[in-house]
């Protein structure tokens, strides 16, 4: 069974940094895309970034370019999200999610421009990030 476990969240002052981790198991890492999402109370789940470990290609939502960096350690089946210059509005539960690479690339080919939660079928339980002012 696909399993994704997030870690690395916590309470951080505005302007600080965090590195979130997503440990994956139960599937062939190179055959999947893995993404990061967040959801603040009362708001929709927001796609932030995803990576295709097979070739290291990365994709970012326009809103997070320049502050967020996604990466993977394929030997550890782990994906990371580095967040710099944290803002109070970054406060949310952060999730990683995965799906077959074909499903993700098909969505791209169909003209889907946003990183949509609906295109990712397997999800972790999330890690809380709280940014204080």
Image (cartoon, helix red, strand yellow):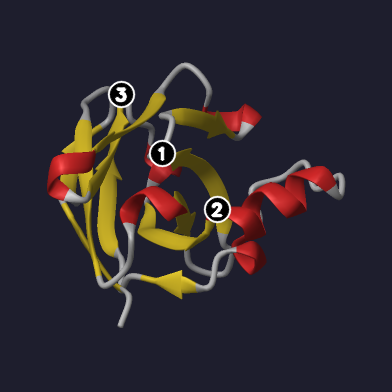
Mark 2 vs 3, N-terminal side: 3
Residue 18 pos. (x, y %):
20, 35
From this view, report whether residue 13 is shown above or below residue 90: above
For this orientation, the residue located farthest to the bottom is 1
Say if mark 3 contacts mark 1, CB within 8 Å.
no
Assign a secondary structure to mark 3.
Answer: loop
Kindly identify which residue carries mark 3.
84
Residue closer to the observer: 78 or 5: 78
Mark 2 vs 1, N-terminal side: 1
Quadrant assignment, res 120: bottom right
Disc 3 residue crowd, few under 14, some 14–19, many 20+, Cα 10 Å: some
Tell me how far mark 2 sits from mark 1, CA to CA: 9 Å
Q: Which mark, by number, is residue 54? A: 1
Q: Residue at x 64, y 63 (%)?
A: 119
Q: Nearer the viewer, mark 3 or mark 1?
A: 1
Kindly identify which residue carries mark 2.
101
Left of 100 or right of it: where is 23? left
Answer yes or no: is residue 78 visible: yes
Quadrant assignment, res 102: bottom right
Quadrant assignment, res 53: top left
Residue 4 pos. (x, y %):
28, 67
Q: Residue at x 31, y 66 (%)?
A: 126
């Amino acid at each position: 069974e696909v399993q994704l476990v997030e870690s690395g969240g916590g309470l951080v002052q505005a302007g600080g940094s965090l590195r979130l981790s997503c440990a994956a198991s139960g599937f062939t890492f190179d055959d999947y895309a893995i993404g990061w999402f967040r959801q603040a109370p009362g708001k929709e789940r927001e796609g932030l970034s995803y990576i295709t470990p097979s070739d290291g290609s990365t994709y970012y939502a326009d809103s997070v370019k320049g502050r967020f960096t996604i990466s993977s350690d394929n030997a550890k089946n782990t994906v990371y999200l580095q967040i710099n210059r944290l803002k109070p509005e970054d406060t949310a539960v952060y999730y990683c999610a995965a799906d077959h690479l074909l499903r993700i690339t098909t969505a791209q080919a169909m003209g889907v421009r946003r990183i949509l939660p609906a295109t990712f079928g397997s999800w972790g339980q999330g890690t809380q990030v709280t940014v204080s002012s």
